[in-house]
């Protein structure tokens, strides 16, 4: 199996995993945000939340690179 045949699976897999990691992240809105106050505090990500955020970024990069590779690779053959 060559790279051109593998790219659609990489794209779909990274998209699916990216959706899961985005949905697992905590929302920043608190109860006060629903009643008009901003409720936003600057907090640093720690532990599992930071790891999940980093994995989401890596998956997004893999997703974009796989799409770009699937666009560029067929053009290189011709």
Image: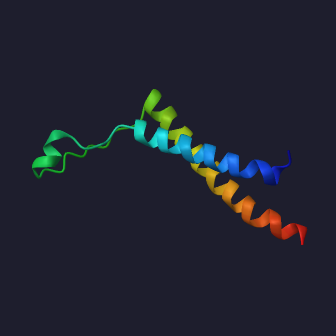
Q: Residue at x 70, y 62 (%)?
A: 68
3 left or right, relative to 37: right
Q: 38 or 72, which is in the foreground?
A: 72
Q: 23 or 26, which is in the foreground?
A: 23
The quarter of the displayed image where residue 25 is located? top left
In the image, residue 24 sits, relative to residue 61, either above or below, namely above
Residue 7 in picture, x, y percent from top left: 73, 51
Q: Residue at x 21, y 40 (%)?
A: 30
- The residue lying furthest to the right in this view is 78
43 left or right, relative to 2: left
Q: What's the colour scheme? A: rainbow
The quarter of the displayed image where residue 22 is located? top left
Q: Quadrant of the C terminus?
A: bottom right
22 left or right, relative to 17: left
In the image, residue 31 sits, relative to residue 74, either above or below, namely above
The quarter of the displayed image where residue 59 is located? top right
Q: How many marks?
A: 0
Residue 21 in picture, x, y percent from top left: 48, 39
Q: 29 or 76, which is in the foreground?
A: 76
- The residue lying furthest to the top in this view is 47
Q: 50 or 60, which is in the foreground?
A: 60
66 left or right, relative to 28: right
- The residue lying furthest to the bottom in this view is 78
Q: Residue at x 55, y 43 (%)?
A: 16
Q: Quadrant of the N terminus?
A: top right
């Amino acid at each position: 199996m060559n790279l051109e045949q593998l790219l659609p699976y990489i794209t779909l897999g990274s998209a699916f995993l990216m959706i899961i990691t985005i949905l697992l992240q905590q929302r920043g809105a608190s109860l006060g945000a629903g009643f008009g106050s901003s409720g936003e505090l600057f907090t640093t990500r720690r532990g599992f939340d930071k790891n999940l955020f980093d994995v989401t970024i890596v998956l997004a990069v893999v997703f974009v690179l796989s799409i770009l590779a699937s666009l560029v690779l067929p053009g290189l053959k011709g």
